[in-house]
Amino acid sequence: MCRTVDLRQAVLARNDGSARELRAALAARGTVAVNLLSSPGSGKTALLEAELGLARRRGVPVAALTADLATENDALRLARSGAPVKQVLTDGLCHLEAVMLAGHLTGWLPDDTRLLFVENVGNLVCPASYDLGESLRVVLASVTEGEDKPLKYPTAFGLANLVLVTKADLAAAAEFDEAAFLANVARVNPGVEVVLTSARTGQGAGVLLERALAVLDGAEPHRPVMAAAQDHGHGHGLHHHEPVVVRDGS
């Protein structure tokens, strides 16, 4: 007798269980994890540098774990903020998993950490399917990547609690069509907040930190329609709704 086993679903189910355990463990110690997803070169590390520096100046106990296939370049950059930083080298693996994250946090994460930023591997495909036990999932896209990015990567954008547009200072030069981008975000994630940022000019500076602190204080982040559909075990069609847009970081 032959039996068909869906290995991918089994792996994801196992990861979901590990993510629930990690989320509960982090909550018990008063730590909120923020999972950052983006393509390579989106400006994720530059934005995180700014947020860590701001958190430190405000006296917020914060730490960051950054994942790459190779090099410790990002960790060296982020460590200049003074926050505890750990580099994870995945040796070719295109994403982090919850059990991996839990293993790297054990014995390293300071007890007083209130915010933990996890800079996932630069990739909008594999990381999108793996819950890391985060309480806030953020997807970033730069103005140079094209307005149809949300449609090309619907899982990454559709499961985000917050969307950040980076390198906004280059929008005119890149002929970025903001209205088209927002419409595409709305198709895959109705109602999600979209924030325009620039690490160079400071536009949107601190918004990510403010949203993370709000979750730490008990605020419920945006609930994506796609996440609700997954919880109920069925798919969901794409509908158009206007997103919430923040331009000045307020």
Image: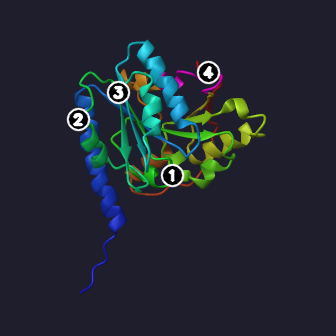
Badge 1 or badge 2: first in the primary sequence? 2
**Marks 1/2: CA distance?**
26 Å
Which of the two discs, 3 and 1, sits closer to the camera? 3
**Marks 3/1: CA distance?**
31 Å
Near mark 2 (Cα within 10 A), the count class, few <14, some 14-19 or many ≥20, is: some
Instruction: Say which amino acid is labelled 4.
Output: Gly
Is mark 4 in CB contact (under 8 Å) with mark 2?
no
What residue is pinned by disc 3? 84
Residue beneath the point at 65% across and 22% down: 201
Near mark 4 (Cα within 10 A), the count class, few <14, some 14-19 or many ≥20, is: some
Q: Which secondary structure lies at badge 2? A: helix
Q: Which secondary structure lies at badge 4? A: loop
The range drawn in magenta is: 199-210
Whether residue 197 can be seen here: yes
Instruction: Say which amino acid is labelled 2.
Output: Ala
What residue is pinned by disc 2? 25
Instruction: Say which amino acid is labelled 1.
Output: Thr
Most extreme residue toward the top is 58
Q: Which secondary structure lies at badge 1? A: helix
Whole-percent x, y for residue 160 in the image: 49, 41
What residue is pinned by disc 1? 155
**Marks 1/4: CA distance?**
29 Å
Most extreme residue toward the bottom is 1
